[in-house]
Amino acid sequence: MLFCFKNLVPHRVCKRLSDFPFDELRKQGFKCALLDLDNTIAPDRAAEPNEYSHRVIRNLKDAGFDCCLVSNAKSSRSAKFAAALGISHVDFAGKPSPKGVWKAMELMNVVAEQTVLFGDQLFTDILAAKRAGIHAVFVEPYDKKEIFYVRFKRFFEYIVRKTCRF
């Protein structure tokens, strides 16, 4: 792995969060799941949770995780989304800055060693997690339909993933 890419390489990769073995992480001492919204637990720019979103949160809670939505959304959409799922949230997170991650950890009363972040973008979610010193899980995007600037970044993510083989 190239040194310059080290903060972009997640600890794990998964296809779908609904199939992720959350129990394994819980046994390793993780107890708080920070979740990106768009294209991680729901389609891009979804107004409300769908069955998939509810299933992911249910699976996390069944495994013993406390959940918090950490979104860069600059509207009340993420707050409404989190409320519908019955979980905490941090909006205006400013990823890839770790500040939103730290704010979520403070809100959830956990330390880095107890926290895992699930996200679909290397240059925001995974970079924020790694900079905050927490476990990072890259989730394959929920849907191919995305806003143009995210589609643009996917090409560069492809280069990182090919170079680092994940």
Image (cartoon, helix red, strand yellow):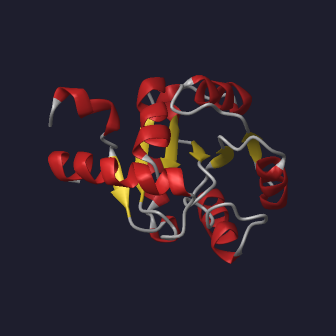
Q: Write the residue at 68% across / 44% down.
A: 68
Instruction: Please tell me how many numbered marks the rendered image carries.
Output: 0
Asked if residue 9 can be seen in this view, the reply is: yes
Residue 6 vs residue 51: left or right? left
Where is residue 164 shown, x and y percent of the image?
18, 45
Q: Residue at x 61, y 24 (%)?
A: 102
Of residues 156 and 122, the one nearer the viewer is: 156
Q: What residue sits 51% from the left and 43% below the top? A: 117
In the image, residue 92 sits, relative to residue 36, either above or below, namely above
Q: Is residue 29 visible?
A: no
Quarter of the image with the C terminus in it:
bottom left
User: Where does residue 8 sit, x and y in percent of width and height?
Assistant: 33, 37
Q: Could you tell me residue 81's position as x and y percent?
A: 78, 57
**Whole-percent x and y of residue 30?**
50, 41
Locate residue 7: give its quadrant: top left
Q: Is residue 114 left or right of residue 122?
A: right
In this view, 52 is above or below 141? below
Point out the image quarter for the N terminus. Answer: top left
Residue found at the very far bottom of the displayed protein: 51
Q: Is residue 159 left or right of residue 119?
A: left
